[in-house]
Amino acid sequence: MKTQNNAENFRNAKKVIPGGVNSPVRAFKAVGAKPIFAERAKGQYLYDTDGNRYIDYCLSWGPMILGHANREVLNEVRKVMVKGTSFGIPTELETKLAAMIVQAIDSVEKVRLVNSGTEAVMTAVRLARGCTGRDKIIKFVGCYHGHVDYLLVQAGSGAMTFGAPSSPGVPKDFTKHTILLPYNNIEMLEKAFKQYSSEIAAVIVEPIAGNMGVVLPKANFLKAIRNLCTKNGSVLIFDEVITGFRIRYGSVQELFGVEADLTCLGKIIGGGFPIGACCGKAKLMDNLAPEGKIYQAGTLSGNPVCVAAGIATLKQLKSDNPYARLDNLTKSLCEQIGLTLKKAKVSHVINQIGSMFTVFFNSAPVTDYASVIKSDTSKYAKYFTKMLEAGIYLPPSQFEACFISTKHKQKDVDKTVAAVGTISF
């Protein structure tokens, strides 16, 4: 594995970019390594500036479900780009993408396009607060909803606590209305509603957690949230920036039999371009300006290039319906990795659903943040480094999700499993 160009690029980047990266996890600090710099990507492969090729299981943190540089997506993007890249006024394409989302998700009647998942969450929370006239928000420890001040919080000493800022620069007043609860804990959720029922504007949750690694909801957890929100007049927000169109065409709400009031989307609906969407029933969405009084705006919202890529991506996903194949290939990969680690007597847990999975170096089930952080991060660092040397690119953190695209093949699974078998833990 060559490293000279990557190392030089990192040195140059650090001179003009804080930490040399524009998003912290890219620095590879969590795995004690130096970052690689992408040169190009195609299909399931990523190529760095030293010419090394990797089987990519990160896929730009999830959006590239069709693989990199998908031909149909790029063709549509080229058609739009020659007409102009930004207008600042409506286009027909925005309506088309919004209509596709409405058709795909039963709980959605209207869509407001924004520029990122973070903006989608900001919009949803403001909408929930504005519609209910309440301030408090419940979120779950380990679920990440973007770097919004009032959601960038850490748990205190109790099982139920008001958030404390997890980053300098976030005033305590910004997080004092954010209640943190353990993921998958219905009892603590009920206690929070009993204590603050008339003050809770919304509950925001990743229906399948992906930002502490893949953590699945326990039976009835999501239904309990739904029931408590309905009973107490609170808004249920599903953050499906990762899971939207990843596990099935549309939302996982149908999978779990739970309808959210508001749904936040991103990643896949932009086909590799920056995008986000706040979606929901008209009775809530029509409170957004200019129809209503709750303000939200964005110069590049509904950008034609991003929207065109999203439409092309969703069209392929709907026509090809690759989800069963993706699930089967991912299950096969996880089972074989598990058998290989078991043979090597390495403690591990693999959480998987659809084309998402995480290998935790943990000896007990991983069901919430408290169990996630018991994972052996030094083992993961070794695993990451050795796999990278073998031409396998994984997320540079134990606490992230891996993804498979429609371009991954059995040969990629075989090479990946063989690489795991060579590691001496």
Image (cartoon, helix red, strand yellow):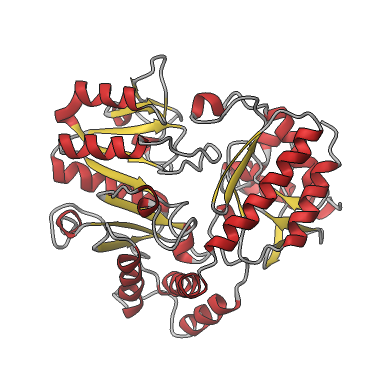
- Residue at the location (39% across, 70% down)? 303
- Residue at the location (32% across, 78% down)? 91
- Residue at the location (58% across, 36% down)? 399
Quadrant assignment for the C terminus: top right
Residue 88 appears in the figure: no
Residue 275 appears in the figure: yes
Quarter of the rendering containing residue 161: top left
Residues 345 and 164: in front is: 345
Picture layout, residue 363 above or below residue 234 = above
Residues 169 and 93: in front is: 93
* Residue 21 x, y percent position in the rendering: 62, 47
- Residue at the location (19% across, 40% down)? 230
* Residue 259 x, y percent position in the rendering: 28, 50
Q: Is residue 286 left or right of residue 208?
A: left
Quarter of the rendering containing residue 201: top left
Q: Is residue 382 left or right of residue 237?
A: right
Disc tally is 0
Q: Is residue 95 left or right of residue 404?
A: left
* Residue 232 x, y percent position in the rendering: 16, 34
* Residue 315 x, y percent position in the rendering: 46, 75
Picture layout, residue 281 above or below residue 191 = below
Picture layout, residue 198 above or below residue 70 = above
